[in-house]
Amino acid sequence: MWFDAQQSKILTEMRGGTNLLRVEIGRWNGEQLEERTCSFCAMGLVEDDPHALLECSAYYRERRQLFSEILQSTRYDMEKMKMDQDWLLQMLLGVSCSEKNQRAAIQTLVAKFLGTLFRTRAKLLQAAQG
């Protein structure tokens, strides 16, 4: 498995906290943390990495597909670990899986998911702006 340069960049930005989610954009614009809520769901939560990867209903189908592909590739059942969001986030970002081949598979699938997430996000933002 492999991913392209854009997907690699997005995964690196998510791991490094320099992505284009509202939590970061709002910080650059001087917004208070509580003002940086997700524009795509009605949860009223800050749009940060855990929200985008694990919670936002705008990406529900894509997330289910991601978890299904991870299960098929690695036998890790991410759905069963939803209650431990810290562990799950670390696994998805590729820092908690000790098995090299499984870690690479997860990173590839997550990079693909993030590419889809940010393309979907850009379309939703563009549609909202008219």
Image: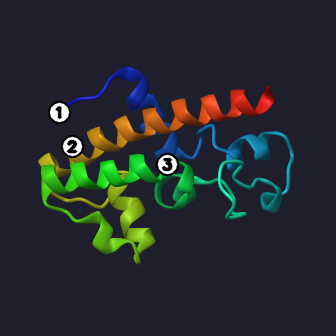
- Between tags 3 and 2, which lies in front? 3
Above or below: residue 49 compared with residue 13 = below
Q: Nearer the viewer, residue 7 or 98?
A: 7
Q: Nearer the viewer, residue 109 or 66?
A: 66
Which residue position is annotated with label 2? 104
Are the residues flagged by discs 2 and 1 in contact, CB closer than 8 Å? yes
Q: CA distance from mark 3 to mark 2?
A: 22 Å
Q: CA distance from mark 2 to mark 1?
A: 7 Å
Q: Which residue is mark 1?
A: 1
Q: Position of residue 92 (x, y in %)?
A: 35, 54
Asked whether, in this view, residue 73 is left or right of residue 128, the answer is left
In this view, 59 is above or below 25: below
Q: Could you say where residue 86 lies in the image, as x and y percent from the top left?
A: 44, 70
For marks 2 and 1, give the one nearer the viewer: 1
Element under label 3? helix
Which residue is denoted by mark 3 in the rendering?
59
Query: Which is more N-terminal, label 1 or label 2?
Result: 1
* Residue at horizontal 79 percent and vertical 29 percent from the top: 129
Q: CA distance from mark 1 to mark 3?
A: 23 Å
The image quarter in which residue 45 lies: bottom right
Tell me which amino acid carries mark 1: Met
**In the rendering, at what x and y percent does residue 106 appear?**
25, 48
Q: Earlier in the sequence, mark 3 or mark 2?
A: 3
Picture coordinates of residue 69, whole percent (x, y): 22, 48
Indicate the secondary structure of the residue bearing disc 2.
helix
Viewer-side label of 1, 3: 3
Q: Quadrant of residue 84?
A: bottom left
Query: Which residue ends up furthest to the top in the rendered image?
Result: 5
Residue at position x 44%, y 32% in the image? 115
Count residues near mark 2 (Cα–Cα under 10 Å), then give few for <14, some for 14-19, many for 20+: some
Give the total number of marks visible in the rendering: 3
Position of 25 with respect to 51 (left or right) is right
